[in-house]
Image (cartoon, rainbow, N blue to C red):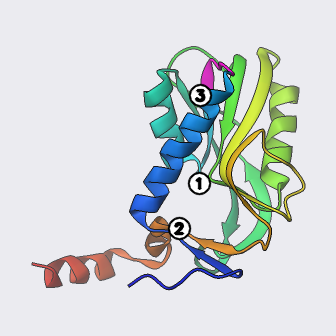
Amino acid sequence: MMPESSDQDLWVTWDQYHHAIERLALLVHESGWKFDQVLCLARGGLRPGDVFCRIFDVPLAILATSSYREEGGTVQGALDIAKHITITRGTLGGKVLLLDDLADSGVTLEKVQRHLAEQFPAVTEVKSAVIWYKACSSVKPDFYLDYLPSNPWIHQPFEEYDRLRPQQLAARLKNSI
């Protein structure tokens, strides 16, 4: 059973998570802004990025970033940004929708936007979209679904995999048969 959400903790089920991605996609669509590519920030933006590129029928680009590595993904450290962007068609350029799951401190969105401006001159415009925008963020995303004034820890449904190891998975699956 899922714990109850509070000002300190927001608990999200898989259904709520998928529905939030769809609602964010509709919000971006209804804004009327057209973009040429989706650049999702891995890891948190991977699932939204996949859905967006399918719904909007635009190429998906992936940029690996990481700052939540310690303590099973619960402690923020230094931000690492990959040197290269992965994209299947062409190169990054034109109007780009920068997509992540949340704006927490805002450092990732801020530094990635600066990185794009410095390293990708073919990019003419960048707008950002996230599901959750925390009040403590130094950057306000262009599009966001939920504003969180109390800055809760967001317990996303895939977090269980941060601590799950192959042996534990094997035991769990064996016991579920």
Q: Is residue 168 visible?
A: yes
**Residue 69, percent from left and from top:** 65, 69
| N-terminal-most mark, 3 or 2 | 3
Residue at the image position 53 percent from the left and 84 percent from the top: 4
**Residue 136, percent from left and from top:** 86, 65
* Looking at the image, residue 42 lies above or below residue 50: below
Return the residue at label 3.
29
Return the residue at label 1.
44
Residue at the image position 82 percent from the left and 37 percent from the top: 113
| N-terminal-most mark, 1 or 3 | 3
* Looking at the image, residue 53 lies above or below residue 94: below
Left or right of 144, for residue 51:
left
Return the residue at label 2.
156
Stretch in magenta: 33-38
Task: Measure the C-alpha gap from mark 2 to mark 1.
Answer: 10 Å
Secondary structure found at label 1: loop
Q: Quadrant of residue 27?
A: top right
